[in-house]
Image (tube, helix red, strand yellow):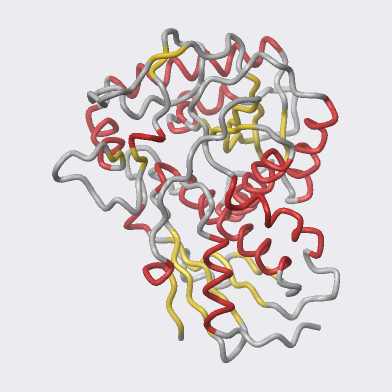
Amino acid sequence: MSTTPLTRPLVTSLIEDAVTAPSMHNAQPWKFVARTDIGVIELHGDPLRGMPHEDPDHRALHLGCGAALFGLRVGAAHRALKPVVRLLPTPDDPWHLADVRFDGPDDADSDLGEFHAALPHRHTSRFPFTEEKIPSEVIDELRAAALLEGCRLVVPGAWHTDTVMNLVHASELFEAADEAVRAEIAAWTRTGAAGEGSDTEGIPSYAFGPRQYDVTSPVRDFGAPRQVPGRVSARFEKRPQIALLGTVGDTPEEWLKAGQAMQRVLLQATLDGLATSLMSQPLEWPELRSDARDPGSAIGFVHMVFRLGYGPQGRATPRRPVAEVLTFD
């Protein structure tokens, strides 16, 4: 059993690892409370950083917080701690998402330390990937990563890939026709113009990637309505290699599991030398989301679509200072 005290420097370093996680539009919708007297770190969701138009049920918010939770577990394993997680520990407080203790058995998350080196290198890439096929053994590793977190990763066949890509393009039309959604996206992009939000959050213009000559890629164009100086255009891969992450159920607990699986898959892909990006556009529209799943698969609900391949890794996007997301009690 771990007897390591939760000192302020230790907790701070754990949260630094946790907040490398991806989140919708890099909103970073998490808060942590360290209760050092009882050896617990609490994870809370921050509804003020939600997306009421694109994510009204807060599913994507839970995914981001789940990803941060996995990063915390990785940081703990790297430091030879024994993390034990309890999801949704306070039934009357839906924003209290998890408690993490560090007094688990000796084998608690002991295998996660290997992911620590990937934490600072996992970045979303909105650049073109090559047409090189990902080896089957690498795909099998990614599937195993999802299974270890209680989720499934499905690599669609040709017809299913075409279906998902059609849903991507349909979601682009939905988005273009919805002024509130466009305004919400604009609120989380950063081009250096006056009046934009903090430069420690959101999607900076250097992470937009190039404009697309065609419409084959499932990369969301955050810079579409704006003029970004120096932004070039490029052709993306003709048939993107995608994978769908899902669960049987569609509850907050399942969303948190999916968020942890999402980060585990992304970190495994990073270790395997893959570039990655996340695509959620068709999953933000109820009338499209149900069509993303393969009716013959064990997945009941799709939570994320990954774009995988070989190409530029992308640059790190900013993160809020730990002092803004961590309190000690």
Q: Left or right: 169 with respect to 102?
A: left
Image position of 288 (left or right of 108): left
Q: Considering depth in this image, is 159 or 218 the residue closer to the camera?
A: 218
State the residue lying farthest toward the bottom.
37
The answer to whether 97 appears left or right of 213 in the picture is right
x then y, percent, for residue 287: 45, 25
**Where residue 123 appears, x then y in whole percent?**
54, 41
Relative to 261, say whether 207 is above or below: above
Residue in the picture at 56% in, 61% down? 18
Looking at the image, is 279 positioned above or below residue 249? above
For the point 62% across and 48% down, the residue is 263
When the figure is inspected, residue 292 is found, relative to residue 142, above or below; the finding is above
Would you identify the image quadrant in which residue 172 lies?
top left
Residue 186 in the image, given as x and y percentages of width and height: 26, 36
Question: Residue 55 at x, y = what percent?
Answer: 40, 42
The quadrant of the picture occupied by the N terminus is bottom right
Which is more toward the observer, 196 or 102? 196
The residue most toward the front is 230
Residue at the extreme left of the image, as rendered: 194
Q: Residue at x 65, y 69 (%)?
A: 86
> Which image quadrant for residue 112?
bottom right
Residue at 32% in and 57% down: 48
How many marks the image carries: the answer is: 0
